[in-house]
Amino acid sequence: MPTTTHNSSASSAPVIGIGLIGSQFIARAHAEAVRRFVTGAELRAVASPTAGHAEALAREFAIPHAFTDTRALLDRKDVDLVLIGVPNDLHARAVTEAAQAGKHVAMEKPLCLTLAEADQMIAACAAAKRHLFYAEELVFAPKYVRIKQLIEEGALGRPYLVKQLEKHSGPHSPWFWDVDRSGGGVLFDMGCHGIEFARWIFDKPKIRAVTGHCATVAHAGRTRAEDDGLLVLEFEGGGRAVIEDSWAFFGGIDDRAEVYGTEGSVFCDLVHGNAMKTWSNPGYGYAMEKAASTRGYSFTVFEEGWNYGFPQEIQHMVDCLRFGQEPRETGADGREVLRILFAAYESAAQGRTILMDGYQPAFPSRPIEAWLRRPGAPAAGK
């Protein structure tokens, strides 16, 4: 692997070749981040099985090679790091194949559908001596990094409560609504962000207990999954986290965090602080396809990728490969988030708090399974 030799000198450190697997929303975010902001790396290839998609992304971001066959990308010697942005049910296979091809891998959230898949992915990368990066961008978001710095500086004292919410009117691709592909609803899609954000703020102690609440309030005609969720996490040592997520929030996106400490507190709006209040009758951006729900005033996010930490996240991955740094987020972190999400759905189904010491999912096939089996749940296909 000629381009992953580490060197302490930036001038002599290797340039990391990046390949993208996937070509839609998250792949565009990655491509834009690398093209505009990341140093020491180059976009070298993109692959998507959908005819024309990889070629379109390659043209937009001047990526020299586009493929419909993922194997063609993995066979390239000039690709060192693969950024994977595909539907959840394809995560395990994509990571395993990339690792076996000798690539470092960055996997978008959630890590995969089952704990067995997580173990397979971690083992495949370990056997190949390649990094498995867990792509949790919130721990790289500039505003949230500043919160972490305030804690480390002692400005807030000892943190004891974290709140994080993310809400909008629904996902951008049809497969999110299909529980067989997605593995869960809004908690699985967005709750994973809040879980890892809280773990990071508290320096990743063990989770003592998980309480989850789920409801389908706005999209029962589209999915069997929940579109509104609430999580309460209790950490060893006394820290607590409250995480709210919704696909039933209209008027744009809301993404905020609060951290309370013994000597202070901080309230952070991730997007509205540098957004533009906008009125649009037809809607805008990816929301155009559901314009009826986006009419009226909303907030147009400015430099969304930067605010969410995508460039900083990828820069960190590149620096890990160039200079031998330790990854901030790994496959093991993604696995723990997945374990917590299994417990959250069981808690919501059973109406009780799940204690996490020695916890194993009652229904390990996918996180949402326990909630789908609850009394009174709609039958499959309805």
Image: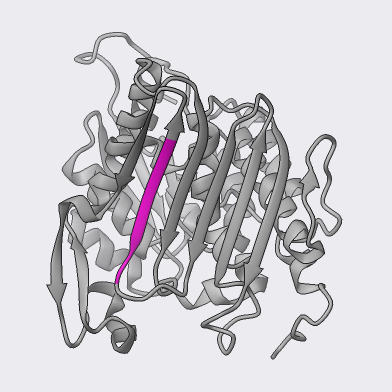
Identify the main secondary structure in magenta.
strand
Say left or right for 268 vs 169: left
Say left or right for 173 vs 339: left
Q: Where does the N terminus fall, quadrant-wise? A: top left
| Quadrant in the rendering for residue 365 | bottom right
Say left or right for 336 vs 318: right
Total marks in image: 0
Instruction: Identify the magenta region.
Output: 252-259
Q: Nearer the viewer, residue 21 or 302?
A: 302
Residue drawn at (33%, 84%), measured in percent from left and top?
293
Q: Where does the C terminus fall, quadrant-wise? A: bottom right
Q: Nearer the viewer, residue 137 or 16?
A: 137
Farthest top residue? 8
Q: Nearer the viewer, residue 50 or 271?
A: 271
Q: State whether residue 329 appears in this view.
A: no
x and y, in percent, of residue 155 in the image: 34, 20
x and y, in percent, of residue 243 in the image: 53, 51
Say left or right for 214 vs 278: right
Residue drawn at (80%, 82%), measured in percent from left and top?
376
Farthest front residue? 263
x and y, in percent, of residue 183 in the image: 65, 64
